[in-house]
Amino acid sequence: MQHFLDRGQHGDWFLIPSHVINLDRHRERWLRLPELASKIGWRIARLDAVDATSMAPDELQAAAATDPVYPLSAAEIACTMSPVLAWRTLLESDEPFLAVFEDDVEVDPLLVRLLDDTSWIPADAEVVKLETFLQRVFVRSARSIAGTDLSLARLGSVHYGTAGYIISRSGARRLLQLSASIDRTTDDLMFDARALWSHKLKVYQVTPALCVQAGRRSEGAVPAFLASSIVPVRRIRSRPSLPGLILRETVRPLRQFWTFMTSTALLQIAGYRRCVVPFSLDRRDGDEQATTMPASRRSR
């Protein structure tokens, strides 16, 4: 595993060092990144990912909870163990923050400006999510990030994706405690409703987001080597009996109303607004297209 060292040896690090998680057997994923990093002035270090194929079954079993939230495959357990290495590395250093990325990430060059400054990060932030999953989320109290067209808002609902985030020392300590016995994937550990509300993990969202997983954007085909190799355990639901089916369909509207009242409505009352966090490059490209489009077409 490649660690970042002290600033005496790596004086060219940004204020927030960047680690990219990568499997040894997925070297082609890593090889695309140094060229990208060189173009935008992004300094990165590689972190060896935990590989389920090289671990004994008892090792994986020891890392997993005996009563997980849902069944976990060996690959899902190993994938959750990989960011744990990054969080530990942060706590073993003197750094206040660490930026963690996955090797299929696409980034906006503006990212490097944020990584060389920490003044924009709230004092209570434990995780700052740099990525968007392009799903509807609730955010609150957006504040502008000086010198950019970005804002930072408190995340109030599930927003999956761990392709890019900044973690603080307090966030690393909290997540290491929560992952001492792995009972769910990293996405759920960090960004599901339990993390945000039951565990009160303080997560902020950069919007528009500065990174996204390759393939989540609409245009272009994704190279085969960037496709996910993680095969989750199939979450099989038993087929209900006819009385059970009738009961389920009868209760469904009540459950939906209860979900609205206990989540959506309460979030709105608390000042959260619902939106889709865009990827900054997509929004910028859209703005440029709108600007260059003839006025007659823009007005239609």
Image (tube, rainbow, N blue to C red):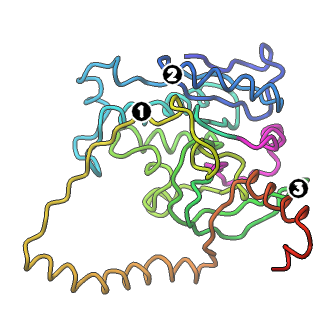
Q: Secondary structure at mark 2?
A: helix
Placement of 256 over or under 229, stated as above or below: below
Magenta-tinted stretch: 107-131
Q: Is residue 265 magenta?
A: no
Q: Is residue 121 magenta?
A: yes
Q: Which residue does the numbered mark 2 point to in the structure image?
A: 26
Residue 33 vs residue 97, the one in the foreground: 33
Q: Which residue does the numbered mark 1 point to in the structure image?
A: 229
Tell me, yes or no, whether the two marked residues, 3 and 2, touch with CB atoms within 8 Å: no
Task: State the residue at coordinates (22%, 41%).
Answer: 66
The residues bearing labels 1 and 3 have C-alpha atoms spaced at a distance of: 39 Å
Q: Which residue does the numbered mark 3 point to in the structure image?
A: 146
Look at label 3 and name its amino acid.
Answer: Ala
User: Which is more N-terminal, label 2 or label 3?
Assistant: 2
Task: State the residue at coordinates (53%, 58%).
Answer: 159
Task: State the residue at coordinates (51%, 45%).
Answer: 174
Tell me, yes or no, whether the two marked residues, 2 and 1, touch with CB atoms within 8 Å: yes
User: Which is more N-terminal, label 3 or label 1?
Assistant: 3
The residues bearing labels 2 and 1 have C-alpha atoms spaced at a distance of: 10 Å
Neighbours of disc 1 within 10 Å: few (<14), some (14-19), many (20+): few
- Residue 198: x and y, percent? 44, 62
User: Which is more N-terminal, label 1 or label 2?
Assistant: 2
